[in-house]
Amino acid sequence: MPIKNNHKHFVLQSLMDINQRTKQYANTKTNTMSHKLKIIFSAILCVICILESSAQSPLEITYNKTSSIVFPVAISAVDRGSRDILAQKVKGVENVLQVKAGKIHFKETNLTVITIDGALHQFSVRYTDAPKTLAIRVADDTKEKPEVTFSQETTGIDLKKSIDLILRDKDNHSIKATSHDQMKFALRGIYIHDNTLFFYLRVTNNSNIPFHTDMLRFYVRDKQKVKRTASQEVTEAPIIQHGNSDVFKGRSSEDLVFALPKFTIPDAKILVIELTEHHGGRHQRLHIRNRAIVKARLVHTD
């Protein structure tokens, strides 16, 4: 389902046809002012109809399926008009955004995506039980098929070596933790090596019911949120991940390490690490302030 500006071609072609017909009428002796006005009025109606017929249709999403939007270049920022929709970039891929409904039958809202070329992409988003398509390609005027843009950050042996050292670190302790519904979600440490930040997480399932993950994501948002305003979020996409975050079995614990390009955040914002359960309600969320990020410990790989 490509979204293009092809309507420009049809509008220009139609205007050319109308202009040609106007000249033909002007060259006839029987032409009157009334005929000219009719031609101009018809031209305006034609352009309006073409623009309306080629307008972008709303983005349809559902609760139990994920829709993927492929942009021609890397994504810079994402703004959801409502928390009823979930959005995250694909791991290791810079130009694909995954979107799904956070709840069933939400009110129609919008989604804004800014790409690194400065383009602003606006989508009206509405709920449906059966989306017409789960893959949406946002095409520009110069490319027929947008290509996936992979992150240029390295995911080589040096990152894996750093992760191994972090997991062996005996001095780490919980920086932030949340616990409810027999689940515990803890940030055990934040580390830095060159231009990469490492977040060491531990997920503990104290129940007998497996926890199947819907999303585990990192994003930055305003610390204070005002009702009835858009929720401004910037997703931080991991370069590499250690550990299985797809499912946490009953009576088990899993250590996870995520490597992200280094960043800091203003004091008015917080980093949110969010773990949501698929077809469940045991969602976990950690709020990390900048003062914890700037205290990241060095990873000594020498």
Image: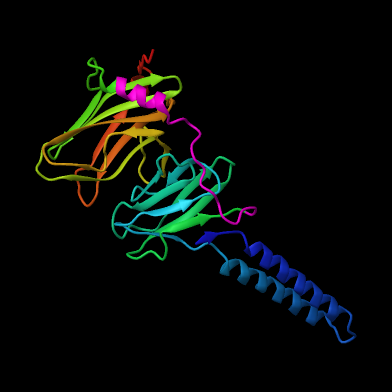
Is residue 154 in the magenta section?
A: yes
For the point 42% across and 63% down, the residue is: 133
Left or right: where does residue 164 sit relative to residue 237? left
Relative image position of residue 128 (x, y in whole percent): 35, 64
Q: Nearer the viewer, residue 204 or 7?
A: 204
The correct choice, above or below, for 113 with respect to 50 in the image is: above
Relative image position of residue 99 (x, y in whole percent): 39, 51
Residue 81 in view: no
Q: Main secondary structure of the magenta part?
A: loop
Left or right: where does residue 152 sit relative to residue 91? right
Q: Quadrant of residue 236?
A: top left
Relative image position of residue 271 (x, y in whole percent): 36, 31
Work out which quarter of the rendered image holds the C terminus and state it: top left
Left or right: where does residue 46 sit relative to residue 295? right
The correct choice, above or below, for 292 with respect to 136 in the image is: above
For the point 81% across and 74% down, the residue is: 20
Q: Nearer the viewer, residue 173 or 43?
A: 173
For the point 76% across and 70% down, the residue is: 16
Q: Quadrant of residue 200?
A: top left
Q: Residue furthest bottom?
A: 30
For the point 40% across and 41% down, the residue is: 91
Q: Which residues are magenta?
A: 141-165
Residue 160 in view: yes
Q: Nearer the viewer, residue 140 or 176?
A: 140
